Image: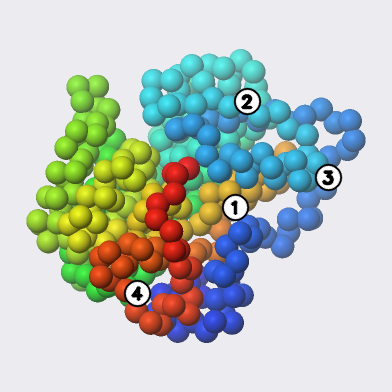
Amino acid sequence: MDPLLTRILNRRLSRRDWLALGGASAGSAALPASLAAEPLPRAGQRPFRIYAVTFRGMTDVEKGFAEYFASRKIPVQISYRDMNREPTRLAGFLDEIRATRPDLIYAWGTSVTLGLVGPYDAVVPSQHITDIPVVFTLVAAPTLAKIVPDMKASGRNVTGVTHVGPTDAQMRAMAQYRPFQTLGVLYTPTEKNSVVVLEEIRRLGREMGFHTVERTFRLDAQRKPVADGAADLVRELKEAGAQWLYLSPDSFLGTLAEGVVIPTAMSLGLPTFASTEQLMQAGALSGLVSRYYNVGQFTAHKAEQILVGKTPASQIPVETLKRFSYQIRMPAAKRLNLPPPLPMLSYAELIHTDAVASQ
């Protein structure tokens, strides 16, 4: 974990350090200094063709991705295809990719990425894409999910951007706000992203001295998650002793966070901690998050390295943004009678509004 981020969560960060890290100016993308080093395409060059597979429609990630190319005057033609949370759609997308041979594939999320490229130790060439570069985004744990064996260089035709802060940093951030011995986790068992993050939390619990109580969303006969009983699951976590409800980077959870999960937790006096910007915007009390728009811009920078700079994807490191924002929603803190510790006020981004529309 970045030493400066550790200092943030251990209260040893000066305001000057926080400003240098970018916490007070979360609108900047904090892209690498090498950004301007890529050669620009020649005038009149045909657009690069990008085939983009999303999981739940368009988000600010895609907005940042597209606007990056426009700002750099890089001609691109992006063909968007949406899974709409339906895994069976991927087979048709794979057929279309093989037929059209795009210059690059954009993959949103862990499930989409694994469906396209497979785990690194179980690639099936007839099923997975191996000969077209893939840039993924919004993947919480690329190594745990077996998308890449090493963040520094994947060794395969894949690179990308992870958007979630280090799990241990998130655990420390929660403990700094309110110490806990029991962490509640509500997740979708069919979402690989959520499963691997939970495994990491369990490991950290053994190291840091807390335990988890867990509930999974119910599945229908087709193993699709359903909203039925979601509020009851939150109540069960509270009754089991949860002192925080951790909102993992779970797409289905995101659909219920603002309308069901967070309001139920609030009514029970159970504070919520967001792992993503979307969940923070849904009304969570606090979270350590990166901006979706900035994630999209950074993902586009990776694509530029491949398309314009001709760098093999296998040699481009998988990275996260250099800057995270520790956000606290003050109206929620007031209703929970849980004001943040005074030292946090020197570095946290305080939000003075209730939930806003989710991404």
Q: Judging from the image, what secondary structure is the residue with disc 1 in?
A: helix
Please state the horizontal and vertical placement of residue 59, each as a whole percent of the image: 52, 39
* Residue type for callout 4: Pro
Residue tagged 2: 79
Residue at the spot x=89%, y=30% of the render?
44
Above or below, 227 against 199 in this view is: above
* Residue type for callout 2: Ser
Q: Judging from the image, what secondary structure is the residue with disc 2 in?
A: strand
Above or below, 76 against 136 in this view is: above
Residue tagged 3: 40
Residue tagged 4: 340
Indicate the colouring scheme.
rainbow
* Residue type for callout 1: Asn
Q: CA distance from mark 1 to mark 4?
A: 27 Å
Mark found first going from the N terminus, 1 or 4: 1
Q: Nearer the viewer, residue 264 or 325?
A: 264
Residue at the spot x=24%, y=56% of the render?
266
